[in-house]
Amino acid sequence: MNRGSLHRMRAWELSRLLARGEVSSREVVEAFLARIEEAEPEVRAFITLTPDLALSQAARVDEARARGENLHPLAGIPVAVKDVICTDGVRTTCASRILENFVPPYDATVVRRLREVGTPLLGKTNMDEFAMGSSTENSAFHPTMNPWDLERVPGGSSGGSAAAVAAGEAPLALGSDTGGSIRQPAALCGIVGLKPTYGLVSRYGLVAFASSLDQIGPMAGCVMDVALLLSVIAGHDPMDSTSAPLPAPDYLSSLEEGVEGVRFGLVREFMGEGIQRGVRRAVEAAAEGLARAGAQVEEVSLPALEYALPAYYIIAPAEASSNLARYDGVRWGLRAEGSRDVVEMQMRTRAKGFGPEVKRRILLGTFALSAGYYEAWYGQAQRVRTLVAEEFRRAYERVELLLSPTSPTTAFRLGERSEDPLAMYLSDVCTIPSNLAGAPAVSVPCGLAEEDGLPVGLQILGPPFSEPLILRAARAIEDLFPGARPAPLGGGVRPVPLSGGEGV
């Protein structure tokens, strides 16, 4: 057993080695820590690393295994967590100066569940500040680079989690998705990322951006690993009033059943203007592959999706304006010193603590909620949200799942869209509708764009709580497109080639 290659393995492969006693949890963690030491100077996927904590957690798993305890398949397999999710005793910054030294006194429910099954925490990953962005350039600390090309962005806002998985720094990661922040970076980094149904995964301990849209979800190198991670974090949580009172289904039992007879709809509105040619061709090839595998594929039109992007950029900033009012320098977090009174202290704290994009969205949201504009802007946006959800409902009377690109383009260059907020916002045009509808969607690699050789993500969308079918379809795409796992590219840190999705 070559211990030096452990970081190239997927979680399900590591699970088998651990179960057979061919490797210890400590050795697995040490392999990923060594890879982080090698790759992190170039990728910069993490804000906070926790090597001592990870090694101590791995030691406890090894001791439990030696006692013959019945362990979860992910026991001893390390995970990286987006720095917007609270971790007891480990700082949670949201990539913002205003929370630079905040150390939560409790775990988010998803983190508690990961600890309970024995997944060591490698660290907290970089992100756009307060999850507001599509490139991970809005971090107050540093940008993250795409392992495929270090001059390009990894996507955002969960870019640190996506880059860590793509670079082999972590086999599993958690992200959060408010308008595409799991799926878009997954597409740009060539990995798998799932936004679950709203309410399937607890939001307790997730620092809020837009509470009616935010959702935590799994990111990994293959569909099998995403399904394994989802099986840990999904399920009802009484600590979250929006948590669905439903048991989590078995996400593994139907994963290998294929797509024969499944009805797919290719969304016309996301295959035309604004979609990079190589992205469109890769998605069309994926649709054709599904048809060859026995699926029924047809084009469907969802006209209301045209209005999803502007509606989102009223609703999300409005909720952010309310949620971020708590960062006032009074209770915790940054406090600007030398102020004459509390009003000046709050103004100076927020001016110093928040970055430009966060300020922009707070201003947008405050305007949309202000007297005289509330109904014309926020009220109208909520009506559009209802139209989008209804459009999806009608589509799922005709087909079972929908297909589209995840991102309209492949990874763009660092700084390319920094001065053009509208161009940046358009990065999420294909992903936002699912958040407005509260429905699940997954991004899975479906090849490389012909223009630049960079990964393309296929987005598979379904009605609420259809995660088993969505993951089954994504697993079929992995079989159809083994070419989506190319040899590593040159020029910097290499992405780890993905292995298959054979069952645990």
Image (cartoon, rainbow, N blue to C red):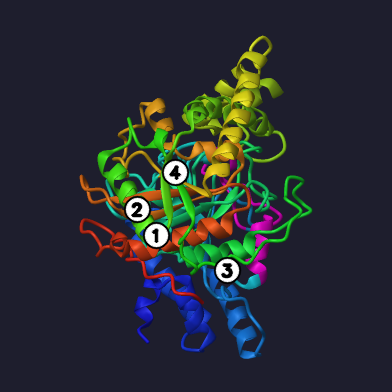
**Position of residue 51 measured from the top left corner of the image (x, y, whole percent):** 51, 67
Mark 1, residue position: 477
Residues shaded magenta: 90-116
- Depth-wise, is mark 1 or mark 3 nearer the camera? 1
Up-down relation of residue 284 to residue 289 (above or below): above
> Which badge, 3 or 4, is on the more N-terminal residue?
3
- Which is more toward the observer, 368 or 277? 277
What whole-number distance in Å separates the C-alpha atoms at marks 1 and 3? 37 Å
Label 3, residues with CA under 10 Å away: few <14, some 14-19, many ≥20: some
Label 2, residues with CA under 10 Å away: few <14, some 14-19, many ≥20: many
- Residue 112 in the magenta stretch? The answer is yes
Q: Which label belongs to residue 53?
A: 3
Up-down relation of residue 59 to residue 230 (above or below): below
What whole-number distance in Å separates the C-alpha atoms at marks 3 and 4? 27 Å
Residue sitting at 51 percent across and 89 percent down? Answer: 21
Q: Quadrant of residue 1?
A: bottom left
Q: Secondary structure at mark 4?
A: loop
**Position of residue 437 measured from the top left corner of the image (x, y, whole percent):** 60, 38
**Position of residue 370 measured from the top left corner of the image (x, y, whole percent):** 66, 15
Q: Quadrant of residue 502?
A: bottom left
Mark 4, residue position: 156
